[in-house]
Image (spheres, rainbow, N blue to C red):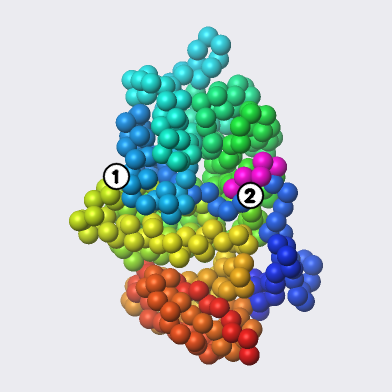
């Protein structure tokens, strides 16, 4: 039995803490750690401009997206932070204060933040820990406290901090400096570390940031999505309430994957308790007639899958079975004692996958099974659940033990 199987079969709830029945101390993860800013107790959810729009950001884009996030049901499903990624900034003024692109943001950044807030959403922004951003805009190096105060003054609730043009800078120390700056900015700000896993952030960032990238950038194709999932999966022990592994933002709705692949993408992110930061044009989701919009909505707005991601136990799931390697079973233990189970078929043909209760960590013979994509109770099953899974797709269920 691998240690995760041992872990999930042994997890029991004792108040709000996670207790362990019968394993060595070395195999016990620490899902709950002190969180300095008290934020992101569940993985952050929101939208970010980069995946779909790159540098093409503007006041009207962000306002339009905030409108659509409210109108499409995204906001009510939990998507909260609306973040402008790279390219909003152009220079520093004589006092060193960061200056936004006045052609793209004619009313300034605070006006955009105010608008986003008026829609019942929160507002995020992007900077870089080094000298310049990845798109060669001014970085925050040497201006950490000043930038944090500027952001707080604008009403920023979330900051993503990149790692381009940072040669020779010590990542843990530099990100710690930014953490301090944000803590003293005068406003609660979620801190998203984006150094792509280059400095093993899963070993130190849990006391620095609320989330940290574990991988390079995702691209809108199946291979890239799976590569990021595989990398991110390894660090499951480091995640917990307030501090999350981040396999990068979602590509759902951007057109480069099939509906099955996008469902797999969303399911894997949820079972890994990953931040759910949409990266599509949400305005297109408001159109109820298009087939694309309907599919994208059925994925991004799947409340049962979102509930797995947002489960308050805050344990990152992982693979408990991969024999043969293409046919995987992923499991995430949930607060109520049930398990979220993803049967993931990486083969090029539809395949049957069986999840036995002992692998999943269910100790009773019988369990209730609910299909989280079909939104259907499948009834009581004994010892195992078996399903035929489409190529590159998933079947995702919630398994609740029934006392013998
Ligand atoms: C890096 C980050 C991306 C995005 C771009 C912006 O590549 O990893 O998520 O922020 O920079 O330039």
Residue 33, x across and y down, in percent:
72, 52
10 Å crowding of disc 2: few (<14), some (14-19), many (20+)? many
The stretch of residues the image draws in magenta is 36-40
At 46% from the left edge and 25% from the top edge, which residue is drawn?
A: 110
Q: Secondary structure at mark 1?
A: helix
Q: Which mark is residue 283?
A: 1
Q: Secondary structure at mark 2?
A: loop
At 41% from the left edge and 29% from the top edge, which residue is drawn?
A: 112
10 Å crowding of disc 1: few (<14), some (14-19), many (20+)? some
Residue sitting nearer the eye, 55 or 267: 267
Question: Where the C terminus falls, by quadrant?
Answer: bottom right
At 40% from the left edge and 76% from the top edge, which residue is drawn?
A: 376
- Residue 237 placement, left or right of 304: right
| Mark 2 to mark 1 CA distance (whole Å) | 30 Å
Quarter holding residue 189? top right
Residue 17, x across and y down, in percent:
72, 62
Residue 205, x across and y down, in percent:
66, 45
- Residue that lies at the very extreme toward the left in this rendered image: 289
Question: Mark 1 and mark 2 in contact (Cβ < 8 Å)?
Answer: no
Residue 200, x across and y down, in percent:
63, 48
Q: Earlier in the sequence, mark 2 or mark 1?
A: 2
Q: Which mark is residue 242?
A: 2
Quarter holding residue 66? top left
- The rendered magenta stretch, by its main secondary structure, is classed as loop
Residue sitting nearer the eye, 77 or 214: 77
Residue sitting nearer the eye, 216 or 26: 26
Residue 120 magenta-highlighted:
no
């Amino acid at each position: 039995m691998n240690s995760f199987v041992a872990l999930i079969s042994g997890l029991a709830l004792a108040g709000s803490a996670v207790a362990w029945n019968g394993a060595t101390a070395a195999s016990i993860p620490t899902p709950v750690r002190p969180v300095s800013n008290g934020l992101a107790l569940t993985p952050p959810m929101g939208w970010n401009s980069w995946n779909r729009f790159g540098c093409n950001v503007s006041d009207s884009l962000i306002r339009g997206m905030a409108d659509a996030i409210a109108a499409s049901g995204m906001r009510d499903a939990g998507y909260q932070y609306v973040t402008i990624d790279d390219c909003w900034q152009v220079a520093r003024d004589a006092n060193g204060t960061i200056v936004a692109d006045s052609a793209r943001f004619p009313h300034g950044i605070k006006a955009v933040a105010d608008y986003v807030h008026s829609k019942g959403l929160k507002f995020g922004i992007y900077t870089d820990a080094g000298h310049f951003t990845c798109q060669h805009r001014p970085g925050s190096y040497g201006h950490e406290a000043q930038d944090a105060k500027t952001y707080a003054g604008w009403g920023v609730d979330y900051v993503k901090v990149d790692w381009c043009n940072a040669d020779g800078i010590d990542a843990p120390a530099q990100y710690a400096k930014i953490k301090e700056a944000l803590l003293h900015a005068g406003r609660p700000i979620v801190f998203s570390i984006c150094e792509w896993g280059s400095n093993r952030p899963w070993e130190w960032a849990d006391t620095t940031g609320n989330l940290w990238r574990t991988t390079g950038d995702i691209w809108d194709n199946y291979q890239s999505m799976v590569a990021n999932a595989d990398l991110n999966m390894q660090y499951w022990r480091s995640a917990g309430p307030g501090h999350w592994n981040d396999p990068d933002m979602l590509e759902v709705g951007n057109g480069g994957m099939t509906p099955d692949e996008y469902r797999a993408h969303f399911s894997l992110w949820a079972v890994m308790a990953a931040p759910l930061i949409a990266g599509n044009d949400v305005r297109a989701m408001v159109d109820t007639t298009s087939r694309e919009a309907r599919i994208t909505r059925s994925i991004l707005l799947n409340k049962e899958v979102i509930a797995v991601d947002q489960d308050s136990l805050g344990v990152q799931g992982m693979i408990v079975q991969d024999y043969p390697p293409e046919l995987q079973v992923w499991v995430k233990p949930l607060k109520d004692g049930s398990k979220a189970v993803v049967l993931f078929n990486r083969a090029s043909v539809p395949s049957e996958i069986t999840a036995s209760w002992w692998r999943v960590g269910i100790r009773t013979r019988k369990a209730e099974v609910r299909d989280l994509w079909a939104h259907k109770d499948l009834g009581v099953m004994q010892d195992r659940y078996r399903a035929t899974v489409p190529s590159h797709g998933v079947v995702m269920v919630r398994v609740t033990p029934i006392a013998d």
